[in-house]
Image: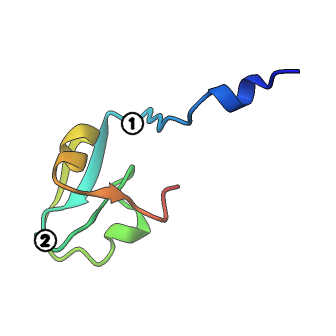
Amino acid sequence: MLSLASSFTPLEISSQSSVYLCNSSNAKKYHYTKNCRGLSNCKHQIIKVSVQEAKKRGKTLCGWED
């Protein structure tokens, strides 16, 4: 018997088109909500960008979000 589950590869699916990030050169994460715990220490401006732009800037999803 063939297992169909083994033929699929997991994809990251995001229903969010915009995310938030701290506009600092040291920031490493993006966030789905502007008031995420991960943004509480941001001393710079919090900006709204597309998921694609956040990834292009080298950001990864905040651990509080997943």
Q: Which residue is mark 1?
A: 16
Q: Quadrant of residue 58?
A: bottom left
Residue 54 in the image: state x and y as whole percent. 22, 49
Q: For the residue marked with disc 2, what is the amino acid? A: His
- Asked whether 31 or 46 is in front, the reply is 31
Residue 46 in the image: state x and y as whole percent. 19, 60
* Foreground label between 2 and 1: 1
Q: Is residue 30 above or below residue 44?
A: above
Q: Is residue 63 above or below residue 33?
A: below
Q: Are marks 2 and 1 in contact (CB under 8 Å)?
A: no
Q: State the SS at label 1.
A: loop
Which residue does the image show at 37% across and 61% down from the upper left?
Answer: 35
Q: Quadrant of residue 30?
A: bottom left
Which residue does the image show at 38% across and 52% down from the upper left?
Answer: 33
Which residue does the image show at 65% across and 26% down from the upper left?
Answer: 7
Task: Rate crowding at label 1 as few (under 14), some (14 to 19) or many (20 or more) other CA atoms within 10 Å.
Answer: few
Residue 6 in the image: state x and y as whole percent. 70, 32
Tag of residue 44: 2
Cα–Cα gap, marks 2 and 1: 23 Å
Which residue does the image show at 10% across and 70% down from the upper left?
Answer: 25
Q: Is residue 11 left or right of residue 45?
A: right
The mark nearer the N terminus, 2 or 1, is: 1
Q: Quadrant of residue 17?
A: top left
Quarter holding the N terminus is top right
Q: Is residue 14 left or right of residue 5?
A: left
Q: State the SS at label 2.
A: loop
Q: How many marks?
A: 2
Q: Is residue 62 left or right of residue 18?
A: right
